[in-house]
Image (cartoon, rainbow, N blue to C red):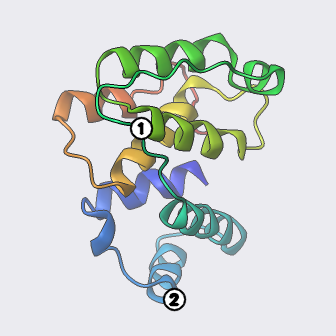
Amino acid sequence: MIDILVYLFANYHDFSARPKTRTLRRRLSAVGFNDEAIGVALRWLDGLKGAPLLDWPDGHRAMRIYVPEEQRKLGADCLGFIAFLEASGLLSPGMRELVVERAMMLDDDPVPIGKFKIIVLMVLWSREQDLEPLIVEELLDAGDAHPLH
């Protein structure tokens, strides 16, 4: 699924410009992705597109307490990365919640930081955030030898 998400980001820089599901499914199949992985990725994206974004008043900093399941699954690396992104102003509390919710859907336990960064990128991309090239480079940097496998 992660490989498909990266492919979509690389080929459709504007989230809303990507083709309809049927066309996208054909294109992904044509470049070699298997049908099961395509289905999982497209369902994940549809869920992301339809997910509500919780809204906090401007300047409000919400303290987030992670439940034990989130702490275990996300681990210190992902939770530290969330804190870094929030402190940098790149991730609002509402976006943070969307990132956590989407990352918790992965089968990985714990979630590798490389995959987690892709989740962050997909959330920001889906909300059509302006991303500086250095931020995109950091989010695409897996941080380990085989992040996508």
Which residue is situated farthest in the front direction here?
A: 57
Front-lying residue, 59 or 7: 59
Q: Is residue 44 above or below residue 104?
A: below
**Viewport quadrant of the N terminus:** bottom right
Q: Is residue 114 above or below residue 39?
A: above
Residue 149 visible in this rendered orientation of the protein: no
Horizontal relation, residue 116 to residue 68: left or right? left
Going by the numbered disc 1, the residue's amino acid type is Trp
Front-lying residue, 27 or 54: 54
Report which residue position mark 1 lands on.
56
Horizontal relation, residue 45 to residue 68: left or right? left
Secondary structure, mark 2, is helix
Front-lying residue, 12 or 93: 93
How many marks the image carries: the answer is: 2
User: Badge 2 local density, few (<14 within 10 Å), some, or many (20+)?
Assistant: few
**Viewport quadrant of the C terminus:** top right
Residue 92, given in percent of the width and then of the height, sits at 38, 33
